[in-house]
Image: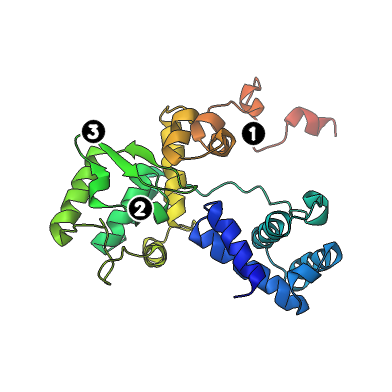
Amino acid sequence: MTSLRRRMTEDMQVRSLSPHTQATYVQQVSLFARHFNKSPELLGPEQIRSYQVYLSNERKLAPSSIILAVAALRFLYKITLHKDWSLQEVIPTPKMPQKLPIVLSPEEVLHFLRCVWNIKHRTILTVCYAAGLRVSEAVCLKVTDIDSKRMVIRVEQGKGRIDRYVMLSPKLLQILRDWWRVDRPQGWLFPDDQVGNHIGRHTIEDACQKARRRCRIPKPITPHCLRHSFAVHLLESGTDVRTIQLLLGHRSLATTATYLRIATTKVCSTLSPLDLLPQTLGAEPDPILLRHS
């Protein structure tokens, strides 16, 4: 390990960045250094600009992938190397396309979950929908996180290393009890085949894709799609945005407010000006206009 890499790793550790973020940043900086075959300490704004052009034009990476490289380089040069650059000018962030999340109807959710044949996988995906959990949060649940007395689920150290509680649906509690009778887990609620570990998120993502092919729903379904559906269905049933923000663990209310653009109670309840016209338009042209043409 080079001294620069060690210093950057220590800087990330003292700021309590997650192990995944640390590994991603180190990888991105390594790719940057290998592109020029030089230490990042010997590279400056012109090389950074050239690298971003390379990622965009030659590698043709998506903005989300380029943003990872930008975040890693910003951390390196601002925190570890103490450069007093204007980061927005030297290392600009590409604009992300504003896409709305894919949402299933309640009927589609039920049909999809019925097509997940493995009981463990189906239970985890049901948790993602019933409690709005990220798949990374669902697979990390412990048996002790299920509080049937208070009817809540404790999500420990979710995204951003923040604890939160979400509701425990009576139906979900019964599903979890059925799962417990099958496997009788003691530590992790969803243990892996390898003793001592919980099941991996990629296993659930693969199971999700297999179920999507079986159910033949044309929408691109992922575990996160179930979380989106949870939020929109709550909004459509009258739950306020602030409560949904707390349940999802969003830091910003603006992130949760995106669902307002999807909920049918907000979008479809507004009358189109076409419906306000005094008469209905027919398929045939107006006969009066035809006589004068």
| Dot label at residue 138 | 2
Relative to 261, residue 81 above or below: below
Q: Which residue is mark 3?
A: 150
Q: Looking at the picture, tell me which residue is in the foreground, 273 or 249.
A: 249
The crowding category of the residue bearing disc 3, from other C-alpha atoms within 10 Å (few below 14, some 14 to 19, many at least 20), is: few
For image coordinates 32% across by 42% down, the residue present is 154
| Element type at mark 3 | loop
Q: Amino acid at mark 2?
A: Ala
Pointer 1 and pointer 2: residues touching (CB < 8 Å)? Answer: no
Apparent side of residue 238 relative to residue 37 in the rendered image (left or right): left
Question: Who's the residue at 68% across and 51% down the image?
Answer: 97
Residue located beneath label 1 in the image: 282
- Which label's residue is closer to the chain start, 1 or 2? 2
Residue type at mark 3 is: Arg
How many numbered marks are there? Answer: 3
Q: Quadrant of residue 52?
A: bottom right
Quarter in which the N terminus is drawn: bottom right
Are dots 2 and 3 in contact, CB under 8 Å? no
- Secondary structure under tag 2 reads helix
Which numbered mark, 1 or 2, is in the foreground of this view?
A: 2
User: Spatial distance from mark 1 to mark 2, Cα to Cα?
Assistant: 53 Å
